[in-house]
Image (cartoon, rainbow, N blue to C red):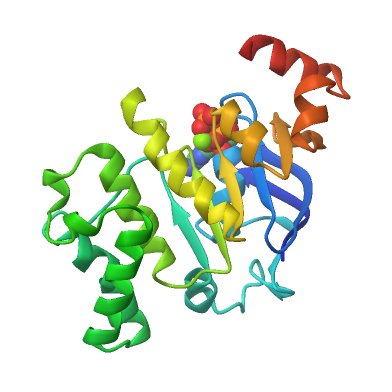
Amino acid sequence: LLEFEHVDKYFGDTHVLKDVSLDIANGEVCVVVGPSGSGKSTLLRCANRLEEIQAGEIRLDDRSISDPGADINRLRQRIGMVFQSFNLFPHKTALENVTLAPRKVRGVDDDTARERGVDLLAEVGLSDQAASYPSQLSGGQQQRVAIARALAMDPRVMLFDEVTSALDPELVGEVLGVMRSLADDGMTMMVVTHEMGFAREVADRVVLMDEGRIVETGAPTPFFERPDTDRGAQFLSKLF
Ligand code: ATP
Ligand code: MG
């Protein structure tokens, strides 16, 4: 569904993605792990065309994302992205944050957008906070609004970049819980996280990046119990 084929990315002279190939299937949850600076965020950002690539191709549903002629606005509607910082609109309520893009970008009428927004807020456990402003919500609640907002565009795939890293520890679980139920509902997801419990329990596949390359990929159980590579073993030994 989301394919990276021999992708190379440079920032100036710095080669940050090196011949990265990865094919994420419909309904798959792919967790990307690796040391700081290994290129995890860059990989996600290339998938959403927030960054350009210098070689290779990225495709969503067999349509090129990386091609210069690609319809970026249309493609972005199909790729939901949630970041570490929630980036909600501060002067809009939770419900307005969720309904804004469908109304403005897609021209969905107010009532329909509202109905769907109410459902999405319920899905992330925030039915009673629809009228709250971001400043009135906890970090975990804001992040759940951000997830609902991304879902409002009915994306084909959801990208998550360390969405729990900025949260107080007691709020991490509620956000991971929402991600887990999305996965259970069959959403295709690419998740950069340090939450190895989540990786172990929810991922269909774990991808280890190091210095811009995918150095190991596998199902979580073998990955965590019997890494194939020295790099994998070394990465795990630092975690546990
Ligand atoms: P972390 O775990 O710290 O978030 P990461 O795996 O997400 O790290 P990236 O943010 O993708 O790593 O960075 C990969 C490399 O690209 C790093 O060497 C980083 O310094 C470099 N880099 C990232 N963004 C830029 C940029 N806008 N300009 C120049 N170099 C960049
Ligand atoms: Mg990062």
Which quadrant would the N terminus be assigned to in this image?
Answer: bottom right
Inspect this view and state whether residue 14 appears.
no
Q: Residue at x 70, y 67 (%)?
A: 59
Q: Residue at x 57, y 34 (%)?
A: 198
Q: Quick check: 100 above or below 26?
A: below
- Left or right of 31? Residue 50 is left
Q: Position of residue 156 (x, y in %)?
A: 58, 69
- Left or right of 34? Residue 108 is left
Q: Residue at x 32, y 60 (%)?
A: 122
Q: Position of residue 120 (x, y in %)?
A: 35, 65
Which of the two residues, 108 or 118, is positioned nearer the viewer here? 118
Which of the two residues, 164 or 87, is positioned nearer the viewer here? 164
Inspect this view and state whether residue 213 appears.
yes
Which quadrant would the C terminus be assigned to in this image?
Answer: top right
Q: Quick check: 141 above or below 61?
A: above
Q: Quick check: 58 above or below 107?
A: above
Which of the two residues, 33 or 53, is positioned nearer the viewer here? 33
Quarter of the image holding residue 135? top left
Q: Position of residue 137 (x, y in %)?
A: 17, 44
Q: Position of residue 35 (x, y in %)?
A: 61, 24
Quarter of the image holding residue 194? top right
Q: Residue at x 49, y 48 (%)?
A: 179
The count of marks equals 0
Q: Quick check: 225 above or below 27?
A: above
